[in-house]
Image: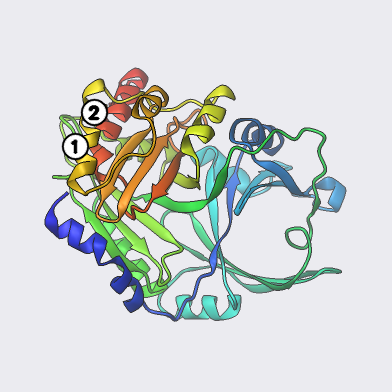
Amino acid sequence: MSKHIESVNYGLEKIFEGAQDFLPLLGTDYVELYVGNAKQAAHYYKTAFGFQSFAYKGLETGSKDTVSYVLKQDKIRLVLTTPLNSKNTINEHIVKHGDGVKVIALWVEDARKAYNETTSRGAKSYIEPYEETDEHGQVVKAGIYTYGETVHMFVERKNYNGVFMPGFVTWESDYKPEPLGLKYVDHMVGNVGWGQMNTWVKWYEDVMGFENFLSFDDKQIHTEYSALMSKVMSNGNGRIKFPINEPAEGKKRSQIEEYLDFYESAGVQHIAVATDDIIKTIKGMRARGVEFLSTPPDAYYEAVPERLLTHNHELREDIETLKSLGIMIDADEEGYLLQIFTKPVQDRPTLFFEIIQRMGARGFGAGNFKALFESIEREQAKRGTL
């Protein structure tokens, strides 16, 4: 990583302090995926990732057009939604994109204010502020479009004490696989088209008050065959982080191009979820059938101790255990991190998950980019899409 990138990264606190405060965000409220079969997808995420049954909305609750299953693990909430008839417009999203993220819901104190602040700054409206009420109180929601057909929904729930939100009931299930230690959404990455990264960086700066605190160009993120560029956007308190990727010229087709071809637009590439014990989490996920990208070569792990010592850190975990699980290691001045990436979680090579454990580091694994993308390219070669 260049000294410039390091200086940007380690000046993070000051940048956060300088970020605009017209859109205070309390955290990620939920992530909603439009899927072809929510019942089966829910079973997969429970079994493979250790999510728990949380809330449900469907025919039994009076919802005639859609069904939604809400899964929870610590602070993470996934909402899986499927249309119940051919006339529902959600079908168009699924036909075009396959299973994918539609809504990144952001928890706010005042949804109306969040909507007014962002639309007055140029955001395209998805849905104007509205209230949902039941005997447990009131939720206020409003939404704006971001890249592609993805939506940021502002959710105000300070006056609600129900299970999830009006229209949902507690989802009771006899099938309760053990959770696997996933804690919260660390960041979510968006892929955008050629020449669009800076457009969306400016959008997040102007519309959402975010700051660009870390940037990588194609000289840093490349392999022999492909390249990409990325900029990381963060809100004022650092709780919401959205890296944005765009393709760059290379000898062959990059992973970003492959995503755009199969998702058929810009969209969420991966959801990074945090754990406090990545070894235990990944052992559990592997045992339950989750597929991960191939393990980096021996030379990668042989170089790890020296890379850590460069930043005066010592690895607490057993490196042979990390190697056996395919977990990668990177460091910065603040500490180190451990990370691993699943293969796509649906047939289209689009959405996947990252599992990350931060041991003080604030970066995104820049030292792992080459090994990671070479692993992705091996998968692309198998698919014939490299």
Residue 38 location in percent, x, y?
68, 39
Q: Amino acid at mark 2?
A: Tyr
Q: CA distance from mark 2 to mark 1?
A: 11 Å
Residue 301 location in percent, x, y?
26, 28
Q: Mark 2: which secondary structure?
A: helix
Against 285, residue 335 (above or below) is: below
Q: Mark 1: which secondary structure?
A: helix
Residue 149 location in percent, x, y?
48, 54
Colour setup of the view? rainbow
Q: Which residue is mark 2?
A: 300
Residue 325 location in percent, x, y?
42, 25
Which numbered tag is attached to residue 277? none
- Residue at the image position 29 percent from the left and 26 percent from the top: 296
Q: Which residue is mark 1?
A: 306
- Residue at the image position 38 percent from the left and 40 percent from the top: 338
| Mark before the other along the chain sequence, 2 or 1 | 2
Q: Give left or right: position of 99 versus 61.
A: left
Q: For the C terminus, which image quadrant? A: top left
Q: Dot 2 surroundings within 10 Å: few (below 14), some, or many (20 or more)?
A: some
Can residue 12 be seen at all in this image of the molecule? yes
Can residue 345 be seen at all in this image of the molecule? no
Q: Amino acid at mark 1?
A: Glu
Q: Give left or right: position of 78 versus 307.
A: right
- Nearer to us of marks 2 and 1 is 1
Against 132, residue 85 (above or below) is: above
Q: Nearer the viewer, residue 206 or 340?
A: 340
